[in-house]
Image: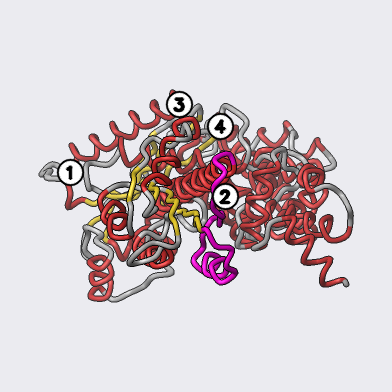
Amino acid sequence: MLVVDDEKLAVQAIAEGIDWSGVGVSVVYKAYNTKQAIEILNREPVDCMITDIEMPGRSGIELMEWAVNNHPGLESVFLTGYADFSYAQKAVHLGIHDYILKPIELDKLLSVVKEMIRKLEQRKENEAFRETYNKYVRLWEDQLPSMSERIWQDLLSERCRLEPEKLNAMFQLYEIPVQAGGTILPILISVERWKEEFSLRDEEIMEYALRKAAQEIILHDGSGTAVQSLDGHNVVLIHLDAYQQDDPYHLDEQIKGKCREYIQSCIRYFKCSLSCYIGEWTLVPDLAEVYRRLVKLERDSVSASNQVVSLREGSPQLLKGAFRQFPASQWSALLEAGEEELLMEEIRKTINHWGREQDLHPEMLESLYYTILHMVYTAAHKKTISISAIYPDEDLLSAPAARRSVHHFVGWCDKVIRTCVSYFKAYCKDDSVAVMKIKQWIQEHFHEEITRDTIAGIVHVNAGYVSRIFRRETGYSLSEYILNVRMEEAKCLLSQTNLKISAVAEAVGFSHFSYFAQQFKKCCGYSPLDYRKLTLMRDE
């Protein structure tokens, strides 16, 4: 604190007549004119000032005018022996904390200074909060998807189809260490199961952590990146140019080893089951094609768990021998597309390829029988249809006579496939219908704790798949859509009822009021209280 008065006794009385340390003042500086006060203010860290107005030379008002321009955070009190209204006006104009008439009552001065100190402490606290807040805003912004991630997302989805020159210019602009003619290896990371129940928000955070862990374990320093594709897959992209490796086989084995290490780390630290699907080295313009094949491989590998699966080697769950001879994925695609004639033609070709009936081994026919069953169950599952709805006569699927001969088998197969395709065409529930069902369920249950697995159970599909079709159909993630539904209901409750805001938060599924208020302001631009006031004003 700085005390300024041309009367030395007055300065001494103020500086020594009160125990300033008791209210948090560590040092009291003394000045007897404006010049001395300015020298101290320029030299010492002064937080508050008590100054007389009437002083020889430059007055206390002139001192305060100087302080406003040079020390804007300074809190000050004016002292004067004259009850002059113009002084009071000037004090208000300069932002003076208070205005005290002489002779001074020390108790009153102490009270005023205490109040001034509380104001200073509050301001410093607010400044510290703003500084901390801005720090975390910057950290959060650094974690947001960068432009380089967006470029890779566009390349994977083929939304970005540029000439090599333009692509190279974009890579250079965003400091991506690869050329349009460079070679890339995509690795798709598929989470099969979380071993703990997570909210949608927590699951998105865990997915982000998985990508960061992949960058640390799988990637060589500066050798690539890990992104989330536009359809929700986690994808690692390795740049071949970053590796000084003459032996491609050794490099592929090294990457497989890194993937196995990554899977074990995720099992241990993130409590999940996942597999890595390794693509093929490809040029940047051909990346989308290899990525599509990886997505298909992941979709077809229904039994893989904690595995490293190579696109070149095929799915690890396929059995050796007869079962591996069947083009099951191709047949499934024909069935789902409703091409029963073409599918039956392909099945007949496969049977004819084996040779005449008397040369056919019974186990091969049995394996083909179970292949058809698996194909039908998988197609029905993808379309969220109960198998019993398609085949009310259960004997059709379990007919033992179907495996007696090729003739019996072809007849059984034809009937099973035509019944399935006919049902799909008449009653098929496609992805859009599944999404509508999810939306309706969310409208009815938004006030509850909702997880992705719960939603997946509603439409009877894989949790990862339900997230992807929902984003594809609506443009929103599940968590974004649930938040929007909750916010719309909250706006209705705030504008149409007298419920307490905490009760509104609970009614729309938030257990913590502060988090509700934060999300409401982020979505609506107003705090819940301000929104309620605004709607009341509009109604009036």
Give coordinates of residue 291: x percent, y percent.
40, 55
Q: Bin the neighbour count of mark 2 within 10 Å (Cα to Cα): few under 14, some 14-19, many 20 and up.
A: some
Q: Is residue 383 magenta?
A: no
Q: Nearer the viewer, residue 150 or 416?
A: 150
Distance from Cα at disc 2 to Cα at disc 1: 38 Å
The label on residue 194 is: 4
Say if mark 2 contacts mark 1, CB within 8 Å: no
Which numbered disc, 3 or 4, marks the residue that appears first in the sequence?
4
Classify residue 523 as left or right of residue 300. right
Which numbered disc, 2 or 3, marks the residue that appears first in the sequence?
3
| Disc 3 target residue | 267
Residue placed at 42% from the left, 51% from the top?
A: 49
Q: Nearer the viewer, mark 1 or mark 4?
A: 4
Vertical position of residue 120 compared to residue 60: above or below? above
Give coordinates of residue 250: x percent, y percent.
18, 37
Q: Which residues are magenta?
A: 81-107
Q: Number of callouts in the render?
A: 4
- The amino acid type found where label 1 is placed reads Pro
Q: Nearer the viewer, mark 2 or mark 4?
A: 4
Q: Bin the neighbour count of mark 4 within 10 Å (Cα to Cα): few under 14, some 14-19, many 20 and up.
A: some
| Disc 2 target residue | 347
Q: Nearer the viewer, mark 1 or mark 3?
A: 3
